[in-house]
Image (tube, helix red, strand yellow):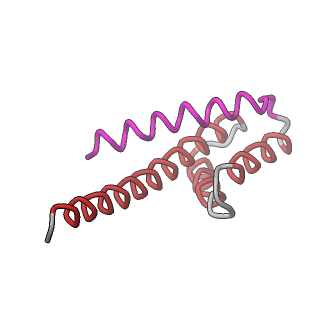
Amino acid sequence: MGEFDKRGKGEEGKFALDNETRFKAEARRNKLLGLWAAQLMGITGDEATNYAMEVVKSDLEEVGEEDVFRKIRGDFDARNVEQSDHQIRREMEQLMATAVKQIAEQS
């Protein structure tokens, strides 16, 4: 195998790993986000865990994170939780950083 082929295989492996890591980080972020939202809505215990899993599943509706945002926004509106769109998006960003750090520490 030539040097170019080896480099290509290495890049393919890195790309696959990056995609896998991003998927794991997004899923973890969504779980953390669900737990945060549950707390604000007064949901505790097993119900909070179940709600967090609903948030994780909501990310499978479409590409990107807008489906997750809409879930949280809709649930906050239904329960009269005062959080602006900006606050929700900021929490999503902060929890993504937390999720990436946690996954990196596990590796």
Q: Nearer the viewer, residue 21 or 56?
A: 21
Q: Is residue 37 magenta?
A: no
Q: Is residue 26 above or below residue 5?
A: above
Q: Main secondary structure of the magenta part?
A: helix
Q: Quadrant of residue 5?
A: bottom left
| Residue 98 in picture, x, y percent from top left | 45, 34
Q: Is residue 86 above or below residue 41?
A: above
Residue drawn where x is 68% and y is 50% of the image = 68
Tally of marks: 0
Residue drawn where x is 58% and y is 42% of the image = 35
Q: Is residue 89 magenta?
A: yes
Q: Which region shows up in magenta?
A: 81-107
| Residue 105 in picture, x, y percent from top left | 29, 39
Residue drawn where x is 77% and y is 29% of the image = 83
Residue drawn where x is 59% and y is 41% of the image = 33
Q: Is residue 40 left or right of residue 12?
A: right
Q: Nearer the viewer, residue 68 or 44?
A: 68
- Check the picture and name the quadrant holding the N terminus: bottom left
| Residue 62 in picture, x, y percent from top left | 68, 62
| Residue 55 in picture, x, y percent from top left | 63, 53
Q: Residue furthest bottom?
A: 1
